[in-house]
Image (cartoon, helix red, strand yellow):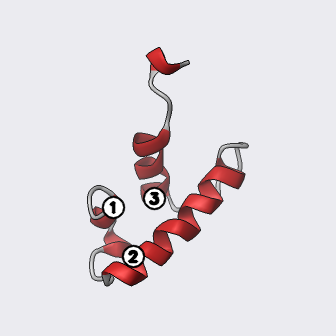
Amino acid sequence: MRTPYGQIKDNRKKSTLAMGASFYKDYALYMTREIKGYRILPRDTHKVFEQMFKPKPDEN
C-alpha cells in the first residue's frame, strides 16, 4: 500500500494507520462511484487506482 498509493502527495506524511483508513475510504468511493463514471476522487488518486485495479486487456 505504501507504493504507489503512499506516493500521492496527500499521503506522504500519513502514518500507516491513517493511510490505511484513507485507502479504504478512497477504495470504497472508487468501487461504488468511480467505476460508474462519476469523478469523485482527486486526479492523482484516481490515476493510482486505475493503475492498481483496472483490468488488463487479456483479463476481459
Q: Does residue 60 sit above or below 10 in this rendering?
A: above
Q: Does residue 31 sit above or below 11 in this rendering?
A: above
Instruction: Kindly identify which residue carries mark 3.
Output: 45
Give the number of the mark in front: 2 or 3.
2
Q: Amino acid at mark 3?
A: Thr
Give the number of the mark in front: 3 or 1.
1
- Can you see residue 49? yes
Label 3: state its secondary structure. helix
Label 1: state its secondary structure. loop
Point out the image quarter for the N terminus.
bottom left
Q: Does residue 10 sit above or below 59 in this rendering?
A: below
Q: Residue at x 32, y 70 (%)?
A: 9
Relative side of 3 to 53, left or right:
left
How many residues crowd around disc 2 within 10 Å: few (fewer than 14), some, or many (20 or more)? some
Place of residue 11 in the rendered image (x, y in percent of width and height, measured from the top left):
35, 74
Instruction: Kindly identify which residue carries mark 2.
Output: 19
Q: Amino acid at mark 1?
A: Met
Relative side of 42 to 16, left or right:
right
Q: Write down the quadrant of residue 35 in the picture.
A: top right
Q: Mark 3 and 1 residues: CB-CB less than 8 Å, in contact?
A: no
Place of residue 23 in the rendered image (x, y in percent of width and height, measured from the top left):
47, 67
Label 2: state its secondary structure. helix
